[in-house]
Amino acid sequence: MNPLTRDIADRIARRFSYLYGEEAVPGLMRRLRMMMGRYGIGLESVSHSGARWDENETVLITYADTISTEGETPLRTLHEFLNRHAKGAIRTVHLLPFYPWSSDDGFSVIDYRKVDPRYGDWEDIERMRGDFRLMFDLVLNHCSRRSQWFRDFVVGIAPSKDYFLPTDPSLDLSEVVRPRSLPLLTKTSTRAGEKWVWTTFSADQVDLNWKNPDVLFDFFDILFLYLAKGSDILRLDAVAFLWKEIGTNCLHLPQTHEVVKLFRDLLDVVAPGTVLLTETNVPHEENMSYFGEGDEAHMVYNFALPPLLLHALLRNDGTHLTRWASGLPDFPDGQTFFNFTASHDGIGVRPLQGIVDDSERDWLVEQVKQRGGRVSTRAMPDGSNSPYELNITYLDALSEPGDPELGLTRFLCSQAVLIALRGVPALYVHSLLGTPNDQRGVEETGHNRAINRHKYRLDDLESVLADGDSKQARVFARLLGWLSRRRNHPAFHPDAPMKVLDLGPGIFAFLRHSVDGQETIACVFNLTPEPAKVKGADLHPRLAKSGEARDLLSGEAIAIGPRRTVSLPPYWGRWLLVN
């Protein structure tokens, strides 16, 4: 833990002044120092210093209860499963909200400071931290109607009576950006009469009033607890919607960015090795704004990647993907992307805005529908609904009706791209396990997102994975192998530069160079169903001279043909070690 130096203290004080007024600053600073003193000793028991990431960094995104068995907690079952199968491939486990909750599979939190007893307890979490780094969620925008905070609001008990946002329903709220096709305000009976509270995501998820510094300090306290319990990455969920001002779109407001900067300031003092990750499923340029000027997030979700890569592989044309990747910034050390293709949510299509036109987006929507997927929408200012996300497993999104092997190959190609790109690769558990669409889950719950949230009994899962010929076992083995190989190559360090190559619409290619310049890997992928050849010289000058190169994907030496070309099977790629 670093001392609260004058420079950092002055910076935090300026942020407090901007958010809450100059007169509040002395009291807020005293309160912060007291809180830091209370937690300081506990934080020293967990190491949060040193490098934030390196080429060993890989993340698995999973629910606490994705895998369960009789007689033990799901958290312990998950831990033991990962120890048996993934210890050398996965470094960090993102445990999606494991707190008591009332809806949205965990993202309507009842109590941020407890582990839901259905999953286990804090001892299970701390035990897992002994074998894996951990990532926790800070669900900042809203909490459950069943939380003690909201119950106190209903009866008028301080301080929670001021934790929410009663709003006059007659006000013009048409400018507010909506992530759902649901009412923005929800009527609530309180001791003081009926009130309409702000509910951005659902009636059960009530938005918090960040204009009240007590809310900020409650979350500071929760942050300190999560650090003490072993969180190495803190994910700020739906942070873009945090601050509300009537007459604005209530998205990415300056005050929201200032709150993110406060969390960053705090981590820089108490846990300088901890990573701050923002989750903002919005158009690409807006998403990038959460890097700030090096003073906000360390990582942001690469939300444009999942739909762009899906589009490229289904269209057999990487023009948009290559153009977008070529324009990605050369991040300074300490900032990078959280790369993923699938998560507990659907595949967001808003990030395509400004990259592909609406006709191509709509074509992608239809392709997903044809493969058994669902489409979730959001309300627009004119009252219409627009596609927001595609609900489908990434495996089935890339399936080919009538040709399951082609679909499997195409999916594996997508994951080879993901794992090689600059940034930290994160695989959703159902991508790693090769899980197909869970249509029964959708029918039973009535929620589109259930299609990608299947729950496994441990015996059933182990049986499937033991069958080496099954699609799931093949996916599992291949992806674990690639993740393990990646860890041995400094060219895959998240800070290692990436140069995108334009080799035509059917090819996606880029070079990764280690930070010290000693290793170069040429990553090249065929986005089409036909075999392709690429000139070695177009990838790297050394490949124009060599008779062979080692392909890290296959683990084999690949012959560079008599015309110095690299052969690529349909929907397949190479990670070619240049030196």
Image (cartoon, rainbow, N blue to C red):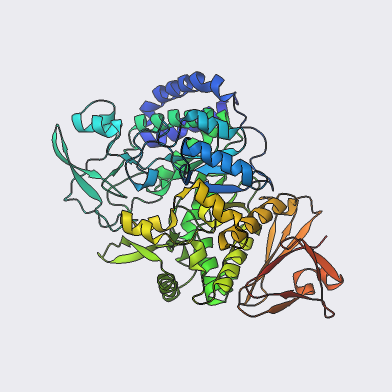
Q: Which residue is rendered at x = 60% and y = 58% of the image?
A: 467
Vertical placement of 475 versus 27: above or below?
below
How many numbered badges does the structure rendering display?
0
Q: Is residue 517 visible?
A: yes
Horizontal and vertical percent position of residue 504: 65, 77
Seen from the viewer's position, the closer of residues 220 and 553 is 553
Vertical placement of 215 versus 343: above or below?
above
Seen from the viewer's position, the closer of residues 304 and 128 is 128
- Tell me: 500 left or right of 191: right
Horizontal and vertical percent position of residue 46: 59, 27
- Tell me: 533 left or right of 444: right
Q: Is residue 276 visible?
A: no
Vertical placement of 576 versus 537: above or below?
above
Q: Quadrant of the C terminus?
A: bottom right
Q: Quadrant of residue 360?
A: bottom left
Q: Quadrant of the N terminus?
A: top right
Q: Quadrant of residue 157?
A: top left
Seen from this angle, which residue lies furthest left?
Answer: 193
Horizontal and vertical percent position of residue 481: 68, 55
- Tell me: 227 left or right of 361: right
- Tell me: 577 left or right of 492: right
Horizontal and vertical percent position of residue 346: 43, 58
